[in-house]
Amino acid sequence: MGMIALLFGLLVLASWRFRRLVVRAREGELEVRQRIENLERENAELLNALEQAREFAEHDGLTGLWNHRMILERLRQEVNRCGREGTPLTAIMVDLDHFKNVNDTFGHAAGDLVLKETGAIFQRMVRSYDWVGRYGGEEFLLILPGTNFVGARKRTEQLRLAVQTARILYGETAIPVTASFGAASGFPSGGESMVLAADAALYRAKENGRNCVMAT
């Protein structure tokens, strides 16, 4: 009888230990799952932070357009591609007319609004494979792959009219905005030469009274 009781006790103890092992195994499995979930969440947060950092490094903080560095990089890439394919390329330099007067008259917040709205106009009007960037201050640079002189002249005039007729409201005040455009088209050997040509055309547009298009 004593032996049976002892064996029964050992059996109960073994059963208890087995259940504890099962519980610990399940707890361990749950802990592993939680750690995996935590790692996955941290990884997603890290990827999101990296994407935000990349976005900040490549885009203008005010307008959301490509920044100066990136729009010039896009131009370099398009020059190389058009050179390989033998297709024309157009670069358009844009300068908002008398932008200082907007800031002086309505304030810098209104000036920021004008820049954002103008950038949005350009984004809406270009093709999916065109590029729009904020070159600096109140200047923009647009890149139109596969566009020759005739197409560039027509397209740039459409952009000019869109800016002139835009209704930009700062509160209840409509801010009149115009811009001068310089377009350079052809088969360039480098991005710098294309920017210089577009900038020279822009300078002629300013000399011609502003709110006009000059193309070369």
Image (cartoon, grey):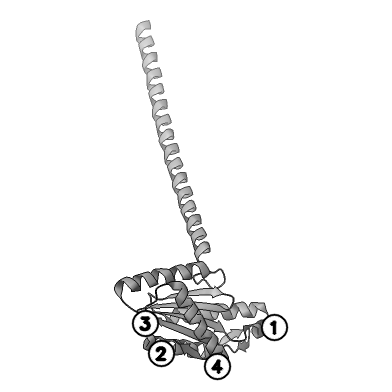
Residue at position x 45%, y 67% from top? 73
In the rendered view, tell whether residue 164 sits above or below residue 47: below
> Pointer 2 and pointer 4: residues touching (CB < 8 Å)?
no
**Residue type at the position of mark 4:** Asn
Observer-nearest residue: 161 or 214?
214
Q: Quadrant of residue 194?
A: bottom left
Looking at marks 4 and 3 on the same chain, the residue that comes earlier in the sequence is marked by 3
Query: Which label sits on residue 147?
Result: 3
Label 1 secondary element: helix
Find the distance from the CA under tag 4 to the CA under tag 1.
24 Å
Image quadrant where one finds the C terminus: bottom left
Query: Which label sits on residue 208?
Result: 4
Find the distance from the CA under tag 4 to the CA under tag 3.
25 Å
Q: Position of residue 115 (x, y in %)?
A: 57, 79
Label 4 vs label 3, nearer the camera: 4
Which residue is labeled 2 in the image? Answer: 154
> Pointer 1 and pointer 3: residues touching (CB < 8 Å)?
no
**Residue type at the position of mark 2:** Lys
Residue at position x 59%, y 79% from top? 113
Find the distance from the CA under tag 2 to the CA under tag 4.
18 Å
Label 2 vs label 1, nearer the camera: 2
Q: Position of residue 3 (x, y in %)?
A: 35, 6
Label 1 vs label 3, nearer the camera: 3
Residue at position x 55%, y 78% from top? 139
Query: Which label sits on residue 104?
Result: 1
**Residue type at the position of mark 3:** Thr
